[in-house]
Each structure stands twice: as structure tokens, then as C-alpha cells.
Amino acid sequence: MRTPLVMGFVATSMAFLFLGVLLRSWQVLVLSLPPLLFLAVGTIAAPPRPLLTAQRVVSRDRLQVGSELQIDLTLRNDGPNLDLLEVVDLLPPEFRLESGTNQAVVPLAPGETFAFSCIVRPALKGEYSLGPVRARAIDPLGLGAEDATVPVTTRVLVAPPLEDMRHVRFAPRRTRPWFGQIPSKRPGLGSEFWAVREYASGDELRRINWKATARLDRPLTNEYVGERSGDVVIVLDARQESFVGTRLDNPVEHGVRAALGIADHVLSARNRAGLVVARNVLDRVLPAFGRKQLFRILEALVRVGTGGQWPFSHVARIVSRYFPTDAHVVLISPLADFTALQATIGLKAQGYDVLVVSPSPLDIQRALVPKSDAQNLAYRILREERANLLLQLRRVSEVVDWDPRTPLALPFRRLGRSIRAP
Amino acid sequence: MISRSLRIAPSACFGILAVWTAYDVVQVSSAAWAVGLLILLTAALITHLLGNVFRGARARSFGLVFLGAAYYGAHVAVLGVQLVVAVAFLTLLIVYVELRFLSDRFAPIYARRLHPDARRHVDGALARAMLRLLVASVLAVFVPIFAADLALSGLVPLTSILTAIFLAAGLVAVIALLALLPLFERRAPRRAPPEGAHPKG
């Protein structure tokens, strides 16, 4: 393949040739030779088509946004000698190069290998494919090039950052029969004292209240509050309307972060957690316990992209179809329109406890527009509108108004006792 | 250090060419020609600067064309063409293009921290490319001078009809070869690629 430089040299040579003939000047005529000599040198050593094999090794295939990933690439030349090989390991644009290189220009003899490595840092969650490797054998004078692609790809899963929710006391209000960590207002297995009752045959000896037994001269047994677990359904609003801002900084991405933090918190307290994502398609993860469920939710959240036009008010119907009515619904939405209010009312009407977590889009939006009086006025109007909507929502559910620049635990703590376990 | 040198080299080369052209344009005695050539030179500098700022290869090419036009305009129209100097200027012009090509490829790689083995490979590639450029430059300067010398000393009569026909035929052959080269490459039989390598079609 010829490069545009060849045409430039030919044109220069022709120009001097015609000018020399026109002016009848042999000196000008001779000037047509240097570009032709460069062309001749380039043509003698034209680059061959590269035949390469490549192997990529990554330090890990699952990582968190902002953590480091080392990529090692080894190339072997299975073809003819390559004077100059330009090679690029294609990385997603979301991966920021920290050190090393993902491209090189090297000579490669037949059978020779070349290895290079780089450390990258992903800036956005997602499921990424590293590669393919693009190679171009070039003439050192830039007059010819031959391209090849080595289809070696590696899948990497980048998880959103996990919010620290350790000191948040959020738990579903209503419990299920399974053993858990939530005091259930019923006697049973647990550690918190509930009452004293008459000894019944089969009671454990360690549960006998010896002081009360001695005082009243009849056997009495301590009863404890039964600790159970509940269900939490996280509903994430990832519709097109909810997207405000940039790819890295938008309410949907912050919502994904919140959903993962809440899921981790709920599951580590031995509750069941499920997920519904409203986007182009309806993603759902049915409720289950444990670490595996966290990974299922994580896999679903990693694939979340903004899109879809379906009405958010239908979410109540979807939730009631797939999830039990005593589940606690956590609705994560930037509340870009009033459909979230309808959705919350719909869920309450179905009998669900609802908590609305709203990553505020106002400051994200504000940062995108240059500051002016009109912008300030618009910001104030939008803030009032949002405050009004939150006020209406607070009549039917608990609301966490979250500024995504702060940790999620902060507004949860501010919410106080109202969402704590009863 | 190497990265910075590679980035500076093309601009330094262009600077030398611009100063050289400006020096020759100033020698032009005719005011009309001098103004016209100075306008060309200024256009060359502006387009080159814009090309560098906005990373526009086309603007840089235009800058180069304007610079060449200013230099050769001055010599062809007023000052007269001195073969050795004119060939040296043209070769330097081509060297600038080649340095730009190498700078675009190598400078970003040297700017990164490389493993010593990788660094050795890249050094080898750069040395090889520079050697090729040096060889081509030396040939581009000496072959035309040698050809002119041969012609002037009467060993090869340049002004005969026969040499004119040979020269024209040679140029047509070179141009035809360049035009047909991709066709020959496509027809040439290729070895089957090993597993894992997929040349682009």
C-alpha cells in the first residue's frame, strides 16, 4: 500500500521536470531527481505484509473502577523480516494509560518475539474487550505500509466503586421466616432479650432464668427476640430521561454505584436482595442470599447503559409480578420527571415499603453550563421543582436526597431512625 | 530527552529552511518580486504554524509547498539556479518531511516509560530508520550532482535528442512502476498465514 507521501514525491519530481522543460534549464530538470531517488530507496525495501501471533496476559480480569490493571503483550513474527513494525494494542477509551506503552515501533526479524507492557486504570464501569492488535509494517521512509490485525481479545469486567455503607443501619421493615440479623418483634432465636415465661419441656437449660426461678420458686425461661431476614428489591432508573451530564459523571452511573453499595450492605446482613433495571430492556435479578447473589447483581449492573423510553410508572406492575409484596423496594432515580412519584404511589398501593434514593442531577447539570444570571435563575427554579417533588414523595415514602459528590452513607445517616430497623 | 529531540527536529529543520529562504528572498533586487516572494514566505510560516497548532497535516504540506515556491521562485526568476545549493535545499525539504514522519511515530513512544528490552528494540528501529534516511539523503544530493557533472564534462551529452528520449522514457517507466506496484503485489502468490495471524484484506 502506497502512502500519500509517494504522490507528493512524484508530484514534486514532475513539477521540476515540466518547469525544467518549460524554462529550458537543465539545472531545474536535474532537481526532479532527488524525490525520485527517495522513491527508489523506498521501493527497493518495500515493507512485506506482517504475519504475527500475539499473546496478551492481564493481571486480573475483574477489577474496580480506578484500580490498576497490568497488560502484557507478546508478539512473534511468523513472517518475513520487518524493518519497521508499528503495533498498537487497542484499548477502550475509558482505560487511562498510567505507565508503559500499548504501542511500539520496532524491527522484527523472522521468528523474533517482542514484548511490551502497560498499566492502565479504567475510569468507567463496564464489560470491556481488550484488543485486537493492529500491526502495520512501514517503510522507514514512510513510502509504503502493509496492515494486519491479530484478533487476540481479552474480556475484562470493571465494577463500579463500592460505597462504604458499614455504619448505615438500613434493613427491610418486614421480615421473612428465614434466620437473619433483623429483630422481628417475635420471640425466637436471637440475642436480644424479649420476655420471661414459664418453663416448657424441651427448653434449653442455658435459657432458664435462674434468678427469677429462685425468687418465684418455679422454673422460668428467658425468651429472645427472633432475628429474621427480609427482602430488598433495588429498582434502578437508567432511562434516557435520567441521563444528564457526561459519560463519567451522570446520575445513572452514580445510581449504579448506589445500587451496588446497597446490595452489598443488604446481602452482608443476611437478607435477600433482587434487582430491576429500567433501561432499553428490563433487567431483573430475582432475590437470593449471599456472595454469589452480589456477583449476579454486579454482573447486571456492569452492563447498565442509559437508554429506553418505557414509562417508569409501570415499575410497580413489574415489581409486583416478580417480587414478594413484603419486600422493601429501594427506588434509585434522579427524579428527572414526575413519573417516579407515580411509580412510588403505585408501589405503595401494592403494599410495598419504598425508599427513594435520588442522586441529584442539578449540580452535574450546573457544572456543564457556563455561569450566568440566567443559569443561576434556572438552577434555582430546578432546585425548587426538585424540592417540591421530594416533598410530595416524602408523604408516601422515605427519601434519600443524595449529592453524588459525597459518600452515600452520609444522607442515609441523616435520614436517622426512620429507616432503621424497628 | 530523545522524545523532545524528535519533537523539536522537524521544526528546527523547517526553521533552517525558512531562514535560508528568507536570506535568499532578501537578496532579490526587484521590489515587486521581493514583495510577492515575502508574501509566499509569510504564508508558508503561517500555514506551518497553524498546521502544528491544530495538528493538520494538510496545512503543513501547504506550508512546505509555499516555502519551496518562495525559494525556487526567487532563484528561477531572479537569482539564478545554483545546482548544488538547489539540490541541497530540496533534499533538506524532503528530510523535513521524513523527520516529521519519524517524529510522529517515535516521539510518543519515547515519551512513555519503557521496559529496557522494549527500549532496546525501539532504539534499534529508530537507528535503522535514521540510517535509511541518511543513505537516501546522501544519494539524493550526490547522484544529481554526479549526473550533472557527467553531463557537463561531456561524457554524457545531455542536450542530445537521444538523452532527452532516454530521460523521458526513464521517468515514464518510474511513474508507471509506482502506479502498477500495488497490482503486482496483489498478484504475487502469498504463503498461507499461520494460525492467529490475519492480514487485512
Image: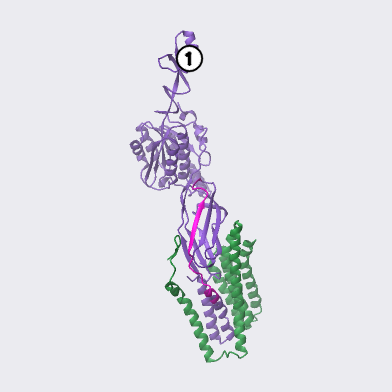
Chain colours: A purple, B green
- Work out whether residue A372 can be spotted: yes
A49 magenta-colored: yes
Note whether A204 is above or below A174 in the view shown: above
B79 vs B117, nearest the viewer: B117
**Residue A339: percent from the left, percent from the top?**
38, 40
Q: Residue B192 sits in which quadrant?
A: bottom left
**Residue A420: percent from the left, percent from the top?**
47, 29
Callout 1: helix, strand or loop?
Answer: loop
Q: Residue at x 51, y 82 (%)?
A: B171
Q: Which residues are magenta?
A: A40-64
Note whether A422 is above or below A157 in the view shown: above
A239 vs A372, nearest the viewer: A239
Mark 1 crowdedness (10 Å alpha carbons): few <14, some 14-19, many ≥20: some
Q: Residue A220 sits in which quadrant?
A: top left
**Residue A26: percent from the left, percent from the top?**
58, 86
B40 magenta-colored: no
Note whether A289 is above or below A93 in the view shown: above
Give the position of the C terminus of chain A as an image quadrant: top left
Question: Which residue position is annotated with label 1?
Answer: A209
User: Is A388 left or right of A142, judged from the image as shown?
Assistant: left
**Residue A86: percent from the left, percent from the top?**
53, 63
Note whether B54 is above or below A63 in the view shown: below
Tell me which amino acid carries mark 1: Asn
* Marker count (numbered): 1
- Work out whether residue B40 can be spotted: no
User: Is A312 left or right of B128, judged from the image as shown?
Assistant: left
